[in-house]
Image (cartoon, grey):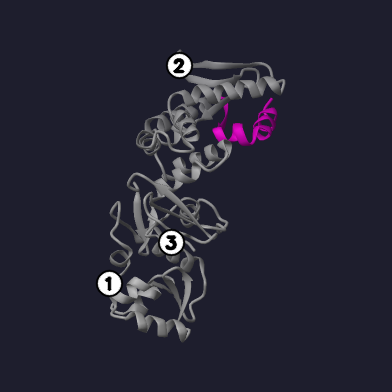
Amino acid sequence: MRFADDVLVPAPLYPPRTNQRFASHPTTWAALARRQGGVISRRQLIRYDVSSSGIGRLRDGGQLVPILAGVFLVRGAPVTLAAKLWAAAIATDGVVGFTSAAHLWGFIEAEPAQIHVLIAHARRVYPPEWVRVHRTRTPIVGQTTRRHLPITSRPTSLLDHLTTLPRSAAVKLADRGLQQGWITPEHVLTRLQRQPRHRGNATLRHIAQLMGDRAAAESERRLHRLLRDAGITGWRANHPVYWRGRRIGIVDVALLSSQVAIEMDGMAYHVDVDRFRNDRRRQNDLIATGWRVLRFTWADLTERPEYVVATIRQFL
């Protein structure tokens, strides 16, 4: 189940109790259940003037099928991902987050085996195995709703998901997130400031460093080591290029005999508009003076080093 971006609307930090949060507009409980993936709670039914005995009769007659404590699936409604998400959110007064939110936002393709929800630390819930509860002592920052379902915002969902990944995979996804505009360096830094002891912060600190000015130096060091390990010689780092007495710029790595310029695009490259424009202008000038330009990303160096080496060898 995926949601379109045009249904994204802001939501309060700690929303009121489930009944108020989910039962604001539909005029009948059946309409509310349809909006909630075929799911409705006992409290919501009572708000629609269905008595406890009436709920019992609906349950005994098979019109309501228990799916979680105090939460029912309307007869005929399939047990879909949407139904499970709504059931978990309603039963826990929680907010869909972590892997579940990452799937809904499109960061991961596979449907998670568990439904992940964030709840207030003091809230007492006893979820089944297919519901994973994450407790927080602080207000849930970055909460929104999508098709009325409470869910962490796209930046928050991505940051939460990054903390669960191996470092190399997290860096690769963060790089993509920067390119797509899903997160900014400010999102990462703000998260580290607000939750300094949060699990997974070591990965976020590493990503923040790569997004900063030190990213270029680290990328270049990795490229130099890769060239040395591959036995590629005849290159010079930070080589100034001149044309008719004017300095065009400094090439990250220059293969002088082949007149090949190797440029590294660090994470900061995706978010610095001035840097992007200057790099493009410099690249055009290099090509105009006879240089061939190769560009590689941080993900290329860390995830596809053999591709980097093979590409460079083609130009020797």
Say which of 4 and 147 sits in front.
Answer: 147
Q: Nearer the viewer, mark 1 or mark 3?
A: 1
Image coordinates of residue 115 in percent, x first then y, are 50, 58
Q: Which mark is residue 25?
A: 1
Secondary structure type for disc 2? strand
Kindly identify the residue that appears in the image at 49 percent across and 63 percent down.
1
- Going by the numbered disc 2, the residue's amino acid type is Arg
Secondary structure type for disc 3? loop
- Whether 103 is drawn above or below 164: the answer is below
Magenta highlight range = 290-316
- Going by the numbered disc 1, the residue's amino acid type is His
Q: Which residue is mark 2?
A: 247
Which circle's residue, 1 or 2, is located before the other in the chain? Answer: 1
Q: CA distance from mark 1 to mark 3?
A: 20 Å
Q: CA distance from mark 2 to mark 3?
A: 50 Å
Q: Which residue is mark 3?
A: 3
